[in-house]
Amino acid sequence: MLLMFAGACVAPRALAADADAVASPLPAWLDELRLDGFFSTTYSYNGNRPDSRTNQLRVFDLADNSFTLDVFELVMQRAVASPREAGFRVDLALGSALPRVSSSQGLFRTGSATEDIDMQQAFASYIAPLGSGLRLDVGKFVTPCGYEVIEGYDGWNDNATRSMLFGFAIPFTHTGARATYTPSRRLTGVLIVVNGWDVAEDNNRSKTLGGQLLLTPATPFTLTLNGMIGPERSNDGSDARSLFDGTAV
């Protein structure tokens, strides 16, 4: 009887404490986080039936007569939109296709080996209160070059590509710093200073410089111009590689 009575006295207090805990608001920073996911799987068949069971001159779909878990991508971010805001974005990619393409030398990937995990993007962001707002990103990010993209949920590319320009002419990711400024709704400029092409750790003593101009002279038309120059050979800081790329949509 005493135990039952004591329980009756304590229970309302415990319930009240639980109610207060539920009613307590989440920290502001936690409420501003966003979590997105993306999953892709394919089956490919090569009518030529190569003895190596490997499709030649392809980028993602290398396996013949095989089901493939291309990628599972998980993205966590605190997006920034206004001056003096700080945030970040992290894209974790798992799978047997996309991580092998987006991986950078020195980050999970060592030598010529390929891995099934990659930190596809991981960068911190800040918008400086200069003019309309100067956005600064530091870390690893997807290249601004090319027509096709490798991002997941917010850059869906529904082609198992055969594009030579995408597979063999441009980099996929960079590690370094990026500045973006939009002086008007018709013009956006981007400047990047990075270690190089698909390298998390620089393979020489020089950096690669790049820039992008995004022009929208009329609402239905967009013109993107990219340029990049810098040495990319290991232990050679003098043999520069140049890239010029234009896309009209």
Image (spheres, rainbow, N blue to C red):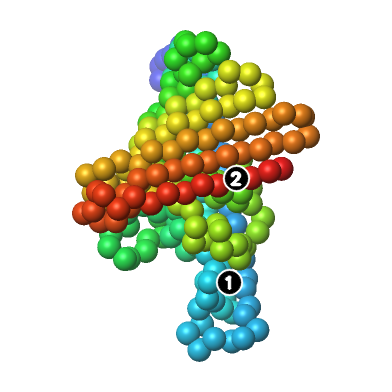
Using the image, tell me which numbered label, if any, was put on residue 67. 1
For residue 164, above or below residue 201: below
Q: Is residue 143 left or right of residue 108?
A: right
The amino acid type found where label 1 is placed reads Phe
What residue is rendered at 59% in x and 87% in y? 49
Q: Is residue 181 visible?
A: yes
What residue is rendered at 46% in x and 58% in y? 101
What residue is rendered at 29% in x and 56% in y? 233
The residue lying toward the viewer, choosing from 170 and 21, is 170
| Residue that mark 2 sits on | 246
For residue 19, above or below residue 197: above
For residue 59, above or below residue 148: below
Name the secondary structure under disc 2. Answer: strand
Q: Position of residue 173 (x, y in %)?
A: 44, 47
Marks 2 and 1 in Cβ contact (< 8 Å): no
Q: Residues within 10 Å of mark 2 (few under 14, many from 20)?
A: some
